[in-house]
């Protein structure tokens, strides 16, 4: 489990590779420790692999729909200039700053927080719908645990078109591994010297 130094492989009677339970990069997954000396040649390709990440019409339509939907609700986002983020996220704390429930500033902040919550609710639903469609199109056989980690690994963006592109490109690595491996087999190889140098 965990990190596997080469000395652990050599202690096993000259073992050159061993599978182990990963506790670092991806908890609970099975990884492989390999003595670099067994790798005579390497081939590399650029990741992500654009050629295997085919866009679907349904996913493209969903991202365009999300762009339109976000534009349509943009006017609902209230102006929060000068209002503390904590007051907006937790309006119940306003009672400490403004004990008088009729205080105009307290009422203004509470009203703004309500409008912001309504806007954010609609915005989250638009993104949920987009993500659900992208999952159906590009990750139909990938389990929920991997999907959650996948979403967390994608670059942050407020643009559904950019998100769709990143999702599509990276999803191909999970959903189309044979096509990715085929790209590697077509790539030129480089010989590795005895000491592990190229």
Image: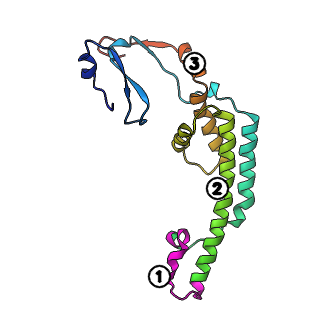
Q: Report the magenta residues as a range.
A: 86-105
Name above or below for residue 14 compared with residue 47: above
Which of marks 1 and 3 precedes in the sequence? 1
Q: Residue at x 30, y 14 (%)?
A: 15
Give the structural element (helix, strand or loop) at label 3: helix
Q: Residue visible at 61% across and 51% down?
A: 158
- Label 1 crowd (10 A; few <14 / some 14-19 / many >=20): few
Q: Position of residue 25 (x, y in %)?
A: 41, 35
Question: Which of the two discs, 3 and 1, sits closer to the camera?
Answer: 1
Q: Quadrant of residue 69?
A: bottom right
Res 70 → quadrant: bottom right
Res 115 quadrant in image: bottom right
Prevailing secondary structure class for the magenta stretch in the rendered image: helix
Point out the image quarter for the N terminus.
top left
- Looking at the rendered structure, which numbered label has been put on residue 124? 2
Q: Which residue does the numbered mark 3 point to in the structure image?
A: 183
Q: Does residue 38 appear left or right of residue 130 in this picture?
A: left
Question: What is the x, y in percent for residue 186?
Answer: 56, 13
Q: CA distance from mark 3 to mark 1?
A: 62 Å
**Is 93 inside the magenta-drawn segment?**
yes
* SS category of the residue bearing label 2: helix
């Amino acid at each position: 489990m965990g990190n596997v130094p080469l000395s652990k492989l050599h202690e096993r009677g000259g073992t050159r590779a061993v599978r182990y339970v990963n506790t670092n990069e991806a908890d609970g997954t099975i990884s492989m420790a390999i003595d670099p000396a067994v790798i005579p040649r390497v081939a590399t390709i650029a990741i992500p692999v654009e050629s295997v990440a085919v866009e679907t019409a349904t996913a493209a339509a969903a991202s365009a729909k999300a762009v339109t939907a976000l534009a349509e609700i943009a006017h609902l986002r209230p102006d929060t200039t000068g209002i503390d983020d904590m007051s907006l996220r937790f309006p119940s704390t306003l009672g400490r700053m403004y004990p008088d429930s009729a205080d105009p500033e307290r009422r203004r902040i509470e009203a703004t927080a309500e409008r912001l919550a309504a806007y954010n609710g609609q915005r989250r639903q638009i993104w949920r719908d987009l993500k659900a469609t992208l999952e159906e199109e590009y990750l139909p056989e990938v389990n929920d645990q991997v999907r959650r980690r996948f979403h967390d690994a994608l670059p942050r963006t407020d643009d559904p078109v950019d998100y769709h592109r990143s999702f599509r490109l990276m999803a191909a690595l999970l959903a189309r591994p044979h096509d990715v491996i085929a790209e590697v087999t077509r790539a030129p190889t480089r010989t590795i010297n005895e000491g592990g140098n190229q």
